[in-house]
Amino acid sequence: MPKTHYRGRFAPSPSGPLHLGSLLAATASFLDAKAHHGEWIVRIEDIDPPREQVGASDAILQALLDHGLQWDGDVMYQSHRSAAYDTVLARLMQEDTLFYCTCTRAELQGHPVYPGTCRDQRRPPARLAALRLSADGSDQQWQDGLQGPQQWSMSEVGDTILKRKDGLYAYQLAVVVDDHAQGISHVVRGIDLLDSTPRQLFLYQRLGWQPPAFSHMPVILDANGNKLSKQNHANPIEAANAAHNLRRCLGWLGQAEPPKNTTSVQAILRFAVEHWQPTAIAGHRDIALT
Ligand code: GLU
Ligand code: ZN
């Protein structure tokens, strides 16, 4: 698919309901897409059943609609995408860039970067194995839309797992295969995923695919300096507070405040699209919860 057109996305994992942190990511990616007259799609990243919460996918979609964040086209579910992931894994295997890793958690303890132990294991072993992508010594660089020039050495990133020992596809594989398949031109997401980007750029390179542009947004930290996340039980957001929630997000994003008499979520979003100023958050890595 040609990438001359802006197509952005929001790609939540259904491990819990939408909270303010994920609403912020959804809102920023939506506003950036719409300010560029682009499309904005939603993809449910349900590739990790043990971490999935029953009903979370539907709850997230409903919460997006409650906040006026209407997506374009159909929602894609990664749980339906196994065939596409297998095709890519088979290709990488044939190109000799994958290996079977049988290391245990204990064996890898104390190694911040995978030490390359199993790199020569190119045939399926008898034991359960993960599939890792062989890194090289290349530098991965990109001009981040919000964080400026970035440079990571693959020797410090290491050999990324693309399929886990338990048989589940890894996020790094699924996100690249699907962003490519869906013709995503711009990824706007939280800075907590910054260190995933060199892994993803390296995989794009291996596959000969053109990567999207990346912008990493600051994350909201609570009073204890913890990121708001499903894991630390950030409160789910209420439909009744939708307009207020959007106003809070715009405030965190340093955006112009919609006039007081702008009350519907649609009108707030229209105002926010017209006044969208991503430079207001450029260079910020976190935002205090206020
Ligand atoms: N599914 C990922 C998450 O919820 C986000 C993926 C992405 O934006 O690249 O953390
Ligand atoms: Zn290993």
Image (cartoon, rainbow, N blue to C red):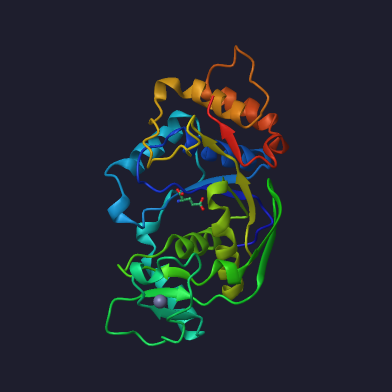
Q: Which residue sits furthest top?
A: 261
Q: Camera-side residue: 280 or 274?
A: 280
Numbered circles on residues, count? 0
Q: Position of residue 20 (x, y in %)?
A: 47, 32
> Is residue 86 in view from this perspective?
yes
* Position of residue 75 measured from the top left corner of the image (x, y, whole percent): 43, 48
Question: On screen, 220 above or below 256?
Answer: below
Q: Would you place residue 90 above or below residue 215 in this image? A: below
Residue for point 64% across, 28% down: 272
To which quarter of the image does residue 248 belong?
A: top right
Judged from this view, the residue extending furthest toward the front is: 110
Residue 53 in percent (x, y) is at 29, 45
Residue 209: tell me if it is visible. no
Residue in the foreground of this view, choosing between 53 and 226? 226
Question: Which residue is at 49% across, 32% downward?
Answer: 222
Please tell me whether residue 178 is drawn above or below residue 40 in the rendered image.
Answer: below
Q: Residue at x 35, y 46 (%)?
A: 15
Between 22 and 180, the one nearer to me in the picture: 22
4 lies above or below 17 = below
The quadrant the C terminus occupies is top right
